[in-house]
Amino acid sequence: MRRIPPLRVVGRSELLPAPIREKAMQELDFPIQFELVDGIEGLQRVVTRPESFDVYLQWHTIDLIWTARSIQPIDMARLNISAEIIAATQSQAGASKVIDTVFDKLFMQPDGQLGRNATQWLSMLPMVHGVDSFGYLEKIQEALSPGEVASWGWLLDPRWAGQVALVGDPVLGIIEGAMAVEAARGRSFADVGNLSVSEVDEVVDTLIHKKKIGHFKGVWLQADDAVRLVQRGGVKMQTIFSPAAATLRGLGVPIVISTPAEGCRGWHSDLCLSAATTGDTLDAAYDFLNWCQNGWAGACFARQGYYATFPDRIRAHLSRDEWDYWYGGIRAARALPDPEGKICVPKDHRREGGSHRERMSRARVWNTFMDEHTHVVRRWREFLEA
Amino acid sequence: MTIGAACCYVCVEHWPDIVLRPQLDRLTVTIRKAYYQIVRELLASNIKAGTLPRGTRLFVAAVADRLAVSRSPVKRALELLAQEGLVRQDAALGYVVGNDADADTGTVRPNLHLLDLHLPGNSSEALVVPRWELILGTVERDLLHAIPFGIYQISETGLCDHFNVSRTVTREVLARLHERGVISKDRASHWIAGPLSARMLDHLHDIRQIVEPAALGQVVGMLVPDAVKAMRARADRALESGQTLSEGELARIEADLHETCLAPLRNPRMMQVVRNSQLSFVVNQLFATHVVRHDETAMLLEHRLVLDHLAIGDGAGAAAAMRHHLDADHLRTRERLKVLAIFGDPGQAPYLVRLV
């Protein structure tokens, strides 16, 4: 065991599931201290106190933390996955084609800005990605017209008044709200991932009105709350993340992840190094980064529905049935386990949306801080408090 | 407030000054003194210093004319001075300096304009600036430092109470802020400030990008070469140190290029447009306050490039370098504004009520 202070790793609970935390602590020869921070406090801390962490799992915050210089560039020479990163950057085919966005801000350019031209320095080490949409209980299908396809407009549809919940995070919420307003009100926003001030106002005003007439049953911030809302809160339709859907299925709740006609909301999460980390701790941080790319961790993420950015590495760590279900979009040949080994996919279930490639190609918009983010945050708070 | 400080308040009119000068930045102007108080203190200090000698006859109209203020505050000031015994009221002569008629060898009624009085500011400036002017800069600064964090309603009553001024004064202040586009009225007719949006920064940048380089081009021949050299040296030192700039250093370096260099500009309207478009200072300053490791290398390199052109008297080059700097700075400011969004309210002036 190396005699160094514990490596401090900060991230959301979905991105640091217990099996990964335990395995990393077993296999790496230095102490690690994981901190799960789901709210805005995590980001605030990363921006204001880089000395309070060593590794951060960024989730659509790369612009902000790079602007604030709270992270340091990652030296490709110290990574065991550099060749694959360069290959993926250059090929623009296969898995890397559908997650093109990940490469937009991957490399530090000579002027200190982030860009896609390959250099020795990475802003972040790509880890996992996925697409999200809303989920609904199977019985919702009974109320559908023949041939009706899922639409973000359903979130505002009076047919399900009082039974809908939304995600409480402003970055995700405003994007989903915008897609719902587009579909429900026949609007078309120039860029649903970067709304203007007046478009933000239109979306939030609509949501506030709906909230006041009792359309929404709740708003959730953490995966547990999303599960609770469906289990006990009378919610039949809501934004949902894969792990929460898996939990619900494990509990026997028949939840369907929608594949909305208007496209899905893509996201990626990546590993970043604190600007303040140096010396032995920096060595340990690089070891942790390399460990995360060993394939085992990616396989663990696959079992909660997340895709590894370099899937070839994890293939060996998944059974054939698992690979076929999670990546291939093929019916489960048997009941499949979640990261903790509990059954979360029943036999014969087929993942909504299909294969990795098919699902990722439906990403219409990626989680991002819009140019008018400040305004989004203020108005979103107004919605939450309405 | 001392009388001498009154001349500082004239500067407060221009918010970029406030933003850029740390010593003024912390200034909170709470005006507790009326005009007559200012006149009273001014007369008292000149009497005590002997510049208004014993026996000098002070007629209200003549004093008002000398100090370039209206008569009523002079009248009230003289009444107070009489109560305090610094002047006496004489039925025939009006007010006379000194309280003992018997001690006088005779009263004189000099042309007050011939007396070399100790007055703040230079003689061509009005002694007492309008009260709205005294608080305008502070209110504008308070608003600009609040709106990156939300949308605020301005309480008119709160404004009156905070500055101890009348409704007439606050209305004047609000009207001017409205003119400058800092505040607007909502449907319920409340004064609203914010949000500071990327769109607002874009609009101001469009203007600034045209006007500021042009202004710089006009002042090239009027700059003191040594002053430009000193600014260049300051930017160099900051670059060489490799350290994060302190708020004071950052303010100083920004002021060098965007304020001091433009100071010789002879067109006051143009100057006003430039100043009103320099909102990015506020964002950059707040960013430096909240973010420990802010990196200003790019800004310093851009500044240095402009200063190099100025040093050799190359107006067109300086203007082009300035345009490049303003464009790059605008992109940085937009990114930084997003970062500010994750911070809570740092606490605002008591007359601002946060709406969102």
Image: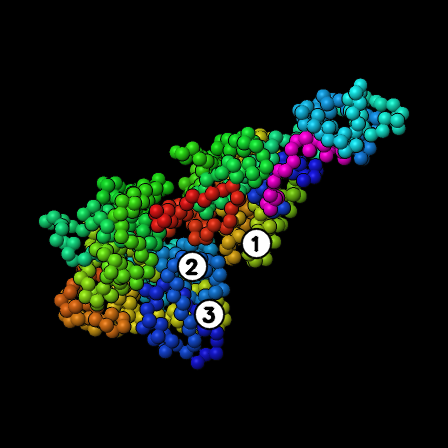
Span shown in magenta:
B24-45
Q: Gap in Å between the C-alphas at discs 3 and 1? A: 26 Å
The mark found on residue A282 in the picture is 3
Q: Is residue A157 magenta?
A: no
| Disc 3 secondary structure class | helix
The residue tagged 2 is A41
- In the image, taking residue A273 as reference, residue B61 lies left or right, namely right
- Name above or below for residue A230 compared with residue B71: below
Say which amino acid is labelled 3.
Leu
What residue is at 34 percent from the left and 54 percent from the top?
A: A169
Q: Which badge, 3 or 2, is on the more N-terminal residue?
A: 2
The residue tagged 1 is B245
The mark found on residue B321 in the picture is none
Chain hosting mark 2: A
Q: Residues within 10 Å of mark 3 (few under 14, many from 20)?
A: some
Pointers 3 and 1 within a single chain: no
Query: Could you say where residue A171 lies in the image, as x and y percent from the top left?
Result: 35, 52
Query: Could you say where residue A276 lies in the image, as x and y percent from the top left?
Result: 49, 64
Residue B225 found in image quarter: top right
| Disc 1 secondary structure class | loop
Tag 2 and tag 1, C-beta contact below 8 Å: no
Chain hosting mark 3: A
Query: Could you say where residue B197 lies in the image, as x and y percent from the top left?
Result: 42, 43
Q: What residue occupies the far bottom of the structure in this picture?
A: A1
Q: Gap in Å between the C-alphas at discs 3 and 2? A: 24 Å
What residue is at 75 percent from the left and 22 percent from the top?
A: B59
Q: Nearer the viewer, residue B13 or A103?
A: B13
Say which amino acid is labelled 1.
Leu
What residue is at 58 percent from the left and 30 percent from the top?
A: B268
Q: Is residue B38 magenta?
A: yes
Q: Nearer the viewer, residue A99 or A208?
A: A208
